[in-house]
Image (cartoon, helix red, strand yellow):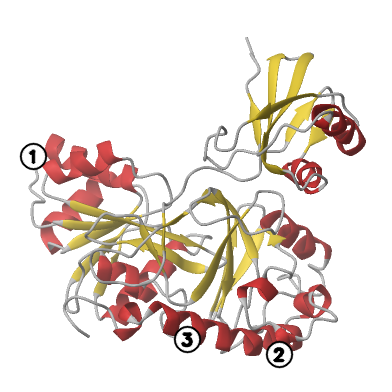
Amino acid sequence: MSTTFYDALETREPAQREAELLAALPAQLAHAQRASAAFARILAGVDAASVTSREALARLPVIRKHELLELQAKDRRADPFGGFSAVRFGPQMPRVFASPGTIYEPQGARPDYWRLARAIFAAGFRRGELIHNCFSYHFVPAGSMMETGAHALGCTVFAGGTGQTEQQVNAIAELRPAGYIGTPSFLKIIVEKAAEMGVPIAGMAKAMVGGEAFPPSLRDWLAERGIAGYQCYATADLGSIAYETQARSGLVIDEGVIVEIVRPGTGDPVPEGEVGELVVTTLNPDYPLVRFGTGDLSAVMPGHCPTGRTNQRIRGWMGRADQTTKIRGMFVHPGQVADILRRFPELLRARLVVSGEMADDVMTLQVEAATALEGLDQRVSQAIRDVTKLRGEVQVLAPGSLPNDGKVIEDARSYK
C-alpha cells in the first residue's frame, strides 16, 4: 500500500477500469440469476452473457428500495431477505442487520465486506492508528460497516457508538485516537462538550463522516478546531459508493460498483453532468444487487480527481429522487412525467410545477424544445390528461432553461 493511494485500482486508465468492470458484469448477473431467487425472477429471460456494455445494462429493470421492502415483506416467512441474498444463515453470514422499514441486510463473511477501507484511507487514516467509531452498532450496520473497513486497513477501533457524550469525550481524551468516524453532527456535539468540560481532545485531528449532510460551514467549523473532516457515501445495501479525497473536489466512485445516473422515475441514463437518480450495480457476490435505485440525486462530474485517482466523480448527495406528489387528490409520479416526455421526441427535458394553494392546485408542465412546433402545447396537454388523469397547462421553453437540479416534480404550492 502506497502512502498516496489505497491500491493500484485507483489509478487505472479509465478505459481499462471500464473494460474490467464490464467484463465482470456478465458473470455477476449470471450468479445473481442462479443464487438469488429474486433476481432469478427479475432477470428471467435475460441472457447474462450478452450484457457487456452500459447500453445493455441500461435495458435491465431498476429495483428501488421500496420494491426491495415490498418483496421482503411478501416473502418474509420463507426468506427474510426477499430472495435477494445469495448466502444463508451460518458461517457465510456472520451478522444480520435491520434498517428502517424494516429492511433486513446480510453481512457476508469476507473481510471489508462493505469496502469502506478505501474511503477511510482517503480520509487520511493509516495502519496502526486508533479510530473512535461513533456510528451505531445497534440494529443498523453502520458501526460494523466502518469497523470492518478500519480492520482491513490495519486500524484498531474503539466502539463508541452513539450517545453518552461525556463518556465519549473522556474516552477520546484518555485513548487519544487519531480520528473520528461517525455523523458530522455528533462530532460537533462531542467537540462542544469537550470545550464545555475543559477536556483537551486536540490529538483527534481527522474524521470521516457520513449518514447525513456535511455542509461546508460545518467542515470549516471543524477545521478551525483542528479536525480535517472528509465525507463518504455508503448504504447498508450497497456498501461504499463514493468517497471524498483531500482534493475536496466531488466524491470519487468506489472501485467495486458500477454507477449510473438516470432520470428520476425511470431507468434511462441522463447525459453526463445532468442531475438524476443514482443507480448502482454492485459486484458483491453475497448480495448481488443489480441496478439498485438509491433514491438519491447526484450528477457525474467531468474530469478526474486532482489527487490522481482516475475513477469518475459524483457531486455528492443532492436531494431525493422520489418526488411523488399528491395533486387534486391524485398521486403524480416522476415516471409519469417521463412517460409524457417519451411521447414527444422533439422535447428535451420536462419539469412539472405544482403551484397555487392546497385544494386549488395549478399544474404546469414546463418543457424544453429545440423548436416550438405549432400545436405542440395542445398535444402535450392532452398527453398530461391521458397519463395523469388531470388537466395541466404547458409552457414551452428554450433548451437549457430548466435548472439542472434533478427535479422532475416541483411542489411550489403555498401551505399557509
Compared to residue 117, the image places residue 233 above or below, namely above
Kindly indicate whether the residue at mark 3 contacts the one at mark 2 (C-beta within 8 angstroms). no
Compared to 144, does 208 lie above or below?
Answer: above
The residue positioned 60% from the left and 68% from the top of the image is 105
Q: Quadrant of residue 367?
A: top right
Amino acid marked by disc 2: Ala
Amino acid carrying mark 3 in the image? Arg
Mark 2: few/some/many CA within 10 Å (<14, 14-19, 20+): few
Q: Dot 2: what SS?
A: helix
Which class describes the residues within 10 Å of circle 3: few (<14), some (14-19), or many (20+)? few
Write down the residue under mark 1. Answer: 198
In x, y percent, where is residue 408? Answer: 65, 38
From the viewer's side, name the closer residue of 303 and 154: 303
Q: Comparing marks 2 and 3, which lies closer to the viewer?
A: 2
> 23 or 343: nearer the eye?
343
Image quarter for residue 104? bottom right
Question: Alpha-carbon distance for marks 3 and 1?
Answer: 43 Å
Which residue bears the numbered disc 3? 110
- Eye-nearest disc, 2 or 1: 2
Tally of numbered tags: 3
Question: Considering only vertical position in the picture, is 190 above or below 177?
Answer: above
Q: Residue at x 41, y 79 (%)?
A: 112
Q: Quadrant of residue 301?
A: bottom left
> Which residue is under mark 2?
49
Task: Estimate the spatial distance between the alpha carbons at disc 2 and disc 1, rounded to whole Å.
Answer: 63 Å
Q: Position of residue 384 (x, y in %)?
A: 84, 33
Instruction: Name the secondary structure under disc 3.
Output: loop
